[in-house]
Amino acid sequence: MKLLDRYILKQMLTTFIFVVLILLAVITVIDLTEKTDKYSKANLSAWQILGYYADFLPWIAGLVTPITVFIATVYITARLAGRTEIIAMLSSGMSFRRMMLPYFIGAILIAGTSFWLNGWVIPNSNKTRLAFEIEYLNKSSNPNLRNIHLQVSPNTFIYIQNYNSVSDVGYQFSIEKFDNNRLIEKLTANRIEWDTAKSKWTLRDWKIRKVDNVFEKVSNDSIGETVTSGLAMDTLLVIEPKEFKNDYRKYDGLTIDELKEYITTLRFRGSAGIEAYEVELYTRYASPFSIFILTFMGVIVSSKKSRGGTGLQIAIGFALSFIFILFVIMFRSFAESGAMPPAISVWIPTLVFGIISAFMYKYVPR
């Protein structure tokens, strides 16, 4: 690596860190201002609040990394162009492609570190952050869940019409077992309760219908069917109350490996809301690539000396950053609502900006 490469790489990394720290400082002040009343009501100590921000800030830093890389790239390149250093590089025989080498080395370092932190390190600290927000900041989902459908084995399905995750009580419960797409057993109960002492479920007003191998219908009566009922019965199920607990941004606290495993479980059970977890998984894979695309675009946008000075180029950089964020939020919403497949919607902003960058590289004077 030449001296010039080391110079550009150092400028890029130091500017990136500086921009991240400034954004984190601004976000911290805003967040602290909004939550001060809640901290006071919860009687939290300074150490508890500091511990929360020790988990909160890395998470924010991971979210803003692609944009901060872009801003840093635009800033340092615009400064080099403003001092005619880029003209001197190109005049010396260096190609534009060769000039971008230190930028991409910096992008590799940032993208690799970001992928590792967002994939495995930050999710573990997010577990503590999410627990803090749920307990002290009232970041909770509706404790009353409705129309729960779960597939607990290849041929066994559970349904609960209403479930209160605070009292661990469900209503209109049923579990159905099938054999070759034919119902062979159905257990229903008006009420299901979790017994913490026994670590078992208690069924109230239950009824079991078992169907024999020979099943016929004569008028409205079923032949080959056995019905048993009772007032109360303890039973073991493969589900526990923790599976109905608050799932507020649960995907933030899952590593990539845990996300894959949890998505597989949700698919097996036929659960709703799987799109949010798929979006998070694909976002973690797409983020490093977006860093490369935005670095490439940043160099192209700001490499030409502008009569308006570096301020104009930096303003253009911020405008493009805003458009990119808008694209990410918009297509993430499409994916989470089920309007678009998550695997496609997550990659669209990166692909669109990649195409724009390629067009600019080919046709914009350099």
Image: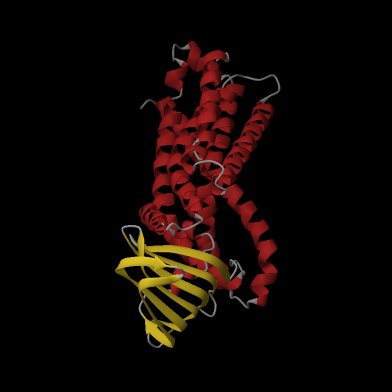
Q: Position of residue 294 (x, y in %)?
A: 52, 32
Residue at the (56%, 22%) spot, across then down: 303
Residue at the (43%, 67%) spot, across then down: 158
Q: Does the rendering let one see residue 199?
A: no
Is residue 244 or residue 132 the one in the foreground?
244
Q: How is the image coloured?
A: secondary structure
Q: Position of residue 325 (x, y in %)?
A: 60, 40
- The quadrant the C terminus occupies is top right
Rendered position, 28 above or below 314: below
Is residue 3 or residue 65 the one in the foreground?
65
Residue at the (50%, 57%) spot, across then down: 272
Rendered position, 12 above or below 210: above
Q: In this view, which residue lies farthest toward the left?
A: 213
Number of on-image labels: 0
Q: Position of residue 227 (x, y in %)?
A: 39, 79
Is residue 175 or residue 362 the one in the foreground?
175
Residue at the (40%, 50%) spot, across then down: 119
Q: In this view, which residue lies farthest toward the front?
A: 219
Instruction: From the viewer's perspective, tell me whether residue 190 is left or right of residue 39.
Output: left
Q: Position of residue 331 (x, y in %)?
A: 57, 41
Q: Place residue 94 in its image quadrant.
A: top left
- The quadrant the N terminus occupies is top left
Is residue 202 or residue 62 the one in the foreground?
202
Q: Does the rendering let one see residue 151?
A: yes
Q: Place residue 163 in its image quadrant.
A: bottom right
